[in-house]
Amino acid sequence: QVRLVESGGGLVQPGVSLRLSCAASGSFLRTNLMAWYRQVPGKERELVARIVWGGASDYADSVKGRFTISSDNAKNTVYLQMNDLKPDNTGVYYCYARLLNTEYTYDDYWGQGTQVTVSS
């Protein structure tokens, strides 16, 4: 059974930084793509940043220059460094992973979500 375990959320003031972590564990061969999504009440989940196995990444326009996604493939872990946080960054952040399984096909997984609240 595969699990994604997130950590690092919290309540912070505007302008400060947070780092989210998401570790994948269980039976799989390797990660293919890992990403962070954000969701606020009444709206669809939206992509914040994603990174593929080779290291290429992309970001939502609203976070470019402030957020950095990185991964440690040996630990099957993805990080989201969030700098200069703004109230609009508030939401539940979900980790997503596409994993290569032992049958050499891909499976998609979601973490349980971690709350990030940016407020003065």
Image (tube, helix red, strand yellow):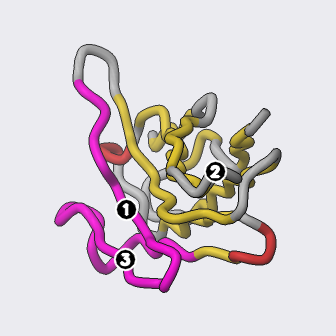
The residue under label 2 is which amino acid type? Answer: Glu
Which residue is at the far front?
103
Going 55% across and 38% down the picture, which residue do you hit? 109
Q: Which mark is residue 49?
A: 1
* Region in magenta: 44-70
The residue under label 3 is which amino acid type? Answer: Ser
51 magenta-colored: yes
Instruction: Say which quadrant the N terminus sits in.
Output: top right
Residue 25's spot in the image, x, y percent?
Answer: 80, 49
Find numbered disc 1 in the image and state the secondary structure of the residue it sits on.
strand
> Which of the pair 82/99 is nearer the observer?
99
Q: CA distance from mark 3 to mark 2?
A: 26 Å
Find numbered disc 2 in the image and state the secondary structure of the residue it sits on.
loop
Nearer to us: label 3 or label 2: 2
Q: Disc 3 vs disc 2: Cβ atoms closer than 8 Å? A: no
Q: Which residue was labeled with disc 2?
A: 103
Which residue is at the far top?
42
Q: Which mark is residue 37?
A: none
50 displayed left or right of 43: right
Residue 72's spot in the image, x, y percent?
Answer: 70, 77
Task: Tell me if residue 58 comes above or below residue 29 in the rendering.
Answer: below
Q: Which residue was labeled with disc 3?
A: 57
Q: CA distance from mark 1 to mark 3?
A: 7 Å
Query: Nearer the N terminus, badge 1 or badge 3?
Result: 1
